[in-house]
Image: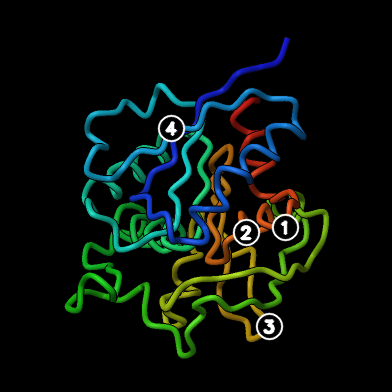
Amino acid sequence: MTQSIRVALIGDYRANAVAHQAIPPAIQLAAQALSLNVNANWIATPELEQHNLADYHAIWLVPGSPYLNDEGVFAALRWGRESGKPFLGSCGGFQYAIVEYARNVLGWADASHAETDPAGRWVIAPLACSLVEQRGTVSFQPDSRIARAYGALQSDEGYHCNFGVNAEFSDALATQNLRVTSWDLEGDVRGIELTDHPFFVATLFQSERAALQNRLSPLVVAWLQAAAG
């Protein structure tokens, strides 16, 4: 019998967003590869309070920042991190996961995202060069969850972003259970994971875009495997 799972896609859907176009086929391709029946529920951020995330097997904070309900997004992130619910974040999901971790694990109450808070401590800051609709090589830490998912130590990936981890804080962010496990060729942070969580992976790049070429996204596969586990 085919196993059925429910996953929550948290974000404000935009039909013209490339990543949003890629997410449904990315899930479908991964579900077929894993012989899973996946019911994916897209939850707009203003409606988060109407949903019990415990009813889902996994959550994905999808691209599309700034979100319409930042407070709800940060609450969902904290719950996912503390509950051990399999979590995937891409692009904006990566950026907000960094801010939530800095605030609630490292105790940086003023940690902020430069796009939405000009007065805070910018752990997410403007990129020196825009990555809107750009591609680039990323490398992975050997034996990290990301590397195991890809079965490789490098990949060519697509982006749609103007913000990333502030290099001033890269080392300080990784002093507890957060590990930086992906970088671009210049050494800038492109992916993180939590060592004390069953599956918590977030990347600035959008691995889901592979589905637009009818290819599997290794991270979506790994996330659904964790959800089904």
Q: Residue at x 71, y 65 (%)?
A: 140
Mark 3 or 1: the one toward you: 1
* Label 4 element class: strand
Inter-mark Cα distance, 2 to 3: 20 Å
Mark 4 or 3: the one toward you: 4
| Label 3 sits on residue | 185
Q: Classify residue 180 as left or right of residue 141.
A: left
| Label 2 sits on residue | 209
Q: Earlier in the sequence, mark 3 or mark 1?
A: 3
* Label 3 element class: loop
Inter-mark Cα distance, 4 to 3: 35 Å
Q: Which amino acid type corresponds to the residue marked 2 in the rendered image?
A: Arg
Q: Classify residue 100 as left or right of residue 160.
A: left
Q: Earlier in the sequence, mark 2 or mark 3?
A: 3
- Pointer 1: residues within 10 angstroms few (<14), some, or many (20+)? few
| Label 4 sits on residue | 41
Q: Are marks 2 and 1 in contact (CB under 8 Å)?
A: yes
Circle on res. 213: 1
Residue nearest the observer in this picture, 82 or 73: 73
Q: Earlier in the sequence, mark 4 or mark 1?
A: 4
| In the image, farthest residue toward the right | 151
* Label 2 element class: helix
